[in-house]
Amino acid sequence: MKKQTKKLMLLLLLNCAVFISLYFVLAHFSFPVHYVYIAAGVVLGFGFVIYNRGFSGKGVTPDMLPNTMTNEEKEAFLLESKQRLESSRWMLTLIIPLILSLALDMMYLFLLPLLQGMLS
């Protein structure tokens, strides 16, 4: 693994631990933290997609691009798309913990009582 990938993985794990802990601590004190996490997730998610231009360059080959573009423009477009995706990977270290925190809360609220009801 690349050094940068290891760094992002450690940041993801740290953010997961911090975001999940913070979520449940604030929820325990009756703070409506789910609204904050949903809003932050939506803003970061839209920002990630918009920054990456809707992933329009992901998996594209020069042959797939329009003939109106020169070969240099095609290569520049593909290189820029790849660079944008690489430079925005850090945003996933925030988006994934937000989603995971909300998913764990949903499991705690709905799945756990359902399983307890089935076992008793």
Image (cartoon, helix red, strand yellow):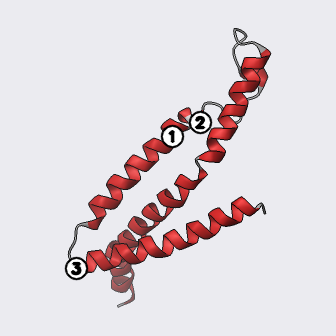
Asked if disc 1 and disc 2 are in contact, CB closer than 8 Å, the reply is yes
The answer to whether any part of residue 58 appears in the image is: no
Q: The N terminus lies in which quarter of the figure?
A: bottom right
Q: Which residue ends up furthest to the left in the rendered image?
A: 30
Q: CA distance from mark 1 to mark 2?
A: 7 Å
Q: Residue furthest top?
A: 68
Indicate the secondary structure of the residue bearing disc 3.
loop
Q: Could you say which disc has been placed on residue 49 in the image?
A: 1
Residue 54: image quadrant is: top right
Q: Residue furthest bottom?
A: 120
Residue hosting label 2: 55
- The image shows residue 73 at horizontal and vertical percentages of 72, 18
Task: Name the element at disc 1.
Answer: helix
Which of 95/63 is in front? 95
Residue that badge 3 annotates: 29
Q: Residue at the spot x=38%, y=49% of the render?
A: 42
Label 2 secondary element? helix
Dot 3 amino acid type: Phe
For mark 2, does the 10 Å Cα neighbourhood hold few (<14), some (14 to 19), or many (20 or more) residues? some
Q: x and y percent of residue 63 in the render?
A: 78, 20
Q: Amino acid at mark 2?
A: Phe
Q: Residues within 10 Å of mark 3 (few under 14, many from 20)?
A: few
Q: Is 52 left, or right, of 116 in this rendering?
A: right
Left or right of 8 on screen, residue 36? left
